[in-house]
Image (cartoon, grey):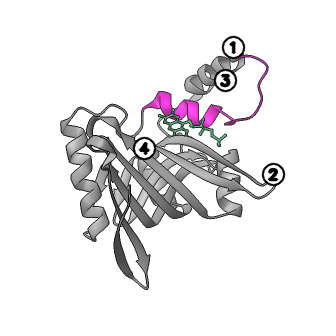
Amino acid sequence: MITFINPSTEKPYIRFQSLYQDALANDQRGIEAISVSSYDLKTNEVEARYVNLKYITDNEWIFFSNYNSPKAQQFSAHKQVSALIFWPSINTQIRIKALISKTSIEFSDMHFKSRSKEKNALAISSNQSQNIDSFDEVEMNFHQTLKSMTTDTVRPDFWGGFSLIPYYFEFWQGHKNRLNKRHTFEQKGGEWEERFLQP
Ligand SMILES: Cc1cc2nc3c(=O)[nH]c(=O)nc-3n(C[C@H](O)[C@H](O)[C@H](O)COP(=O)(O)O)c2cc1C
């Protein structure tokens, strides 16, 4: 589930919320999954991965991750990303171009405090995407961290939120005979320019 906190009332955000409600009403599984693609300046490659979109606050789309992970390094060197959602229950794709940055320390702390001890133990104990000799080691690190945690355990600096600020949306809706509807919004000079595209 995505938590909406005073979401923007601009047109593409209203459209997004309405589709989200439709997908929710149609029991869409994994409704918060969003694929985020980033560009790696060092290897000249583009990489995609799913993350869970946890909040939409004003015009920011927020998910959480490890700040030392490959994706975090890619985001800091190249702030433009492409994001993608597909909700099969309503045959809808949402395609986004956005700029990405870290959320505030306060927001990351607030979310960390709201999570289960187990989830936080994993966030603390995992050097995300680094090589490891065996899965036993992952489990051992997790259980040791879980055991050592107290009510005073705070969010580590290497874990927190990322905030996407979209500047382009395409809402794609599949229809019979491939008469698919494509509706785009592009931010230009503070306004959203709206277009319809051929299927
Ligand atoms: C549905 C789904 C949701 C995921 N959500 C997150 C997430 O919110 N944060 C995260 O760090 N990784 C998440 N992952 C794992 C990432 O896809 C990825 O494996 C991990 O973040 C490492 O990516 P990186 O090596 O590009 O940094 C999720 C995976 C799936 C399949």
In magenta, the rendered stretch is: 116-134
Could you tell whether 151 is left or right of 121 in the image? left
Could you tell whether 89 is left or right of 184 in the image? left
Is label 1 or label 2 in front?
2
Q: Position of residue 135 (x, y in %)?
A: 69, 17
In reply to whether residue 185 is colored magenta, the answer given is no
The quarter of the displayed image where residue 138 is located: top right
Residue closest to the eye, 70 or 23: 23
Above or below, 19 relative to 131: below
Q: Amino acid at mark 4?
A: Lys
Could you tell whether 62 is left or right of 40 in the image? left
Q: Amino acid at mark 1?
A: Asp
Q: Which residue is label 3 attached to?
A: 141
On residue 43, the disc is 2
Q: Position of residue 123 (x, y in %)?
A: 57, 36
Marks 1 and 4, the one that precedes in the sequence: 4
Marks 1 and 2, the one that precedes in the sequence: 2
Q: How far apart are labels 4 and 2 at the CA level?
A: 36 Å
The quarter of the displayed image where residue 116 is located: top left
Q: Amino acid at mark 2?
A: Thr
Q: How far apart are labels 1 and 3 at the CA level?
A: 9 Å
Q: Are marks 4 and 2 in contact (CB under 8 Å)?
A: no
Q: Position of residue 96 (x, y in %)?
A: 46, 58
Q: Which residue is label 1 attached to?
A: 136
Q: Are marks 1 and 4 in contact (CB under 8 Å)?
A: no
Is label 4 or label 2 in front?
2
Q: Amino acid at mark 3?
A: Asn
Q: How far apart are labels 1 and 4 at the CA level?
A: 28 Å
Is label 1 or label 4 in front?
1
Above or below, 158 relative to 115: below
Q: Residue furthest bottom?
A: 189
Residue 95 showing in the rendered view: yes
